[in-house]
Image: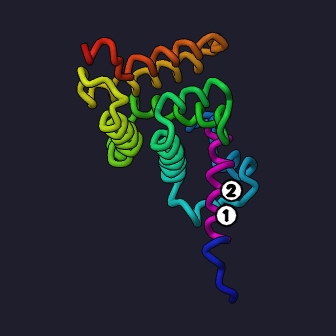
Amino acid sequence: MPRVSQHHLDTRRRQILDGARVCFARHGYEGATVRRLEETIGLSRGAIFHHFKDKESLFLALAEDDAARMADVVAEQGLVQVMRELLAGDGEHPADWLGTRLEVSRRLRTDPDFRRRWAERSQQLTTATRNRLLRRREAGQLRQDVDIDVLTSFLELVLEGLVSHLAMGLPADDLEPVLDLVEETTRRHQSREDD
């Protein structure tokens, strides 16, 4: 029997994650039945669950994948850029990412076992945000009067607020200036700090 290449396995895994993202966003965790996953992904349950132990493992892998993509953007451009991409509908899967993010939030609130499993994996975004803020502080671009952990929590809370705002279907056309203000609050201001 021919051996399957790593490239083929990686491509298949990406296909499963991308399809699952759409299915979970459209139907929620409970509504994303195995049959719906098969239909959306375009693969059999055997092919899907060859790569993932069960539906929860698939969902956790998807949430981790989204968190890793966000962490990459944060490392390069900051957490506010992630928010800008959500507003603009940029990125690979902005609407589907939002659905996954909301489903993660709901499950964190209602499922203690999921909360425990997610806590083991969710530090990536916080770490990326904190490290970027540290680099900006070292470069003299970040305000000095607020602790890095406080600024990290502030930006994460703004992200969660934006996600909730978008989830409620509220207008988002006028939020760019709000994100400008969020960025401005973290910057070092020469006139105030150097006087």
Range of magenta residues = 8-24
Cα distance between the residues tagged 2 and 1: 6 Å
Whether residue 115 is visible here, answered yes or no, is no
What colour scheme has been applied to the protein in the rendered image?
rainbow
Task: Give the residue drawn at x 47%, y 32%.
Answer: 79
The amino acid type found where label 2 is placed reads Gln
SS at badge 2: helix
Residue indicated by mark 1: 11
Task: Give the residue drawn at x 58%, y 61%.
Answer: 49
Whether residue 20 is visible here, answered yes or no, is yes
The kind of secondary structure the magenta stretch mainly shows is helix
Is 20 one of the magenta-colored residues? Answer: yes
Task: Give the residue drawn at x 71%, y 52%.
Answer: 41
Q: Nearer the viewer, residue 185 or 80?
A: 185
* Left or right of 108 on screen, residue 80: right
Q: Find out whether the residues at labels 2 and 1 contact each other: C-beta distance under 8 Å.
A: yes
The amino acid type found where label 1 is placed reads Thr
What's the mark number on residue 140? none
SS at badge 1: helix
Percent x, y for residue 126? 36, 38
What's the mark number on residue 15? 2
Percent x, y for residue 174? 63, 10
* Left or right of 51 on screen, residue 79: left
| Quadrant containing the N terminus in the rendered view | bottom right
Q: Residues within 10 Å of mark 2 (few under 14, many from 20)?
A: some
Percent x, y for residue 158? 44, 20
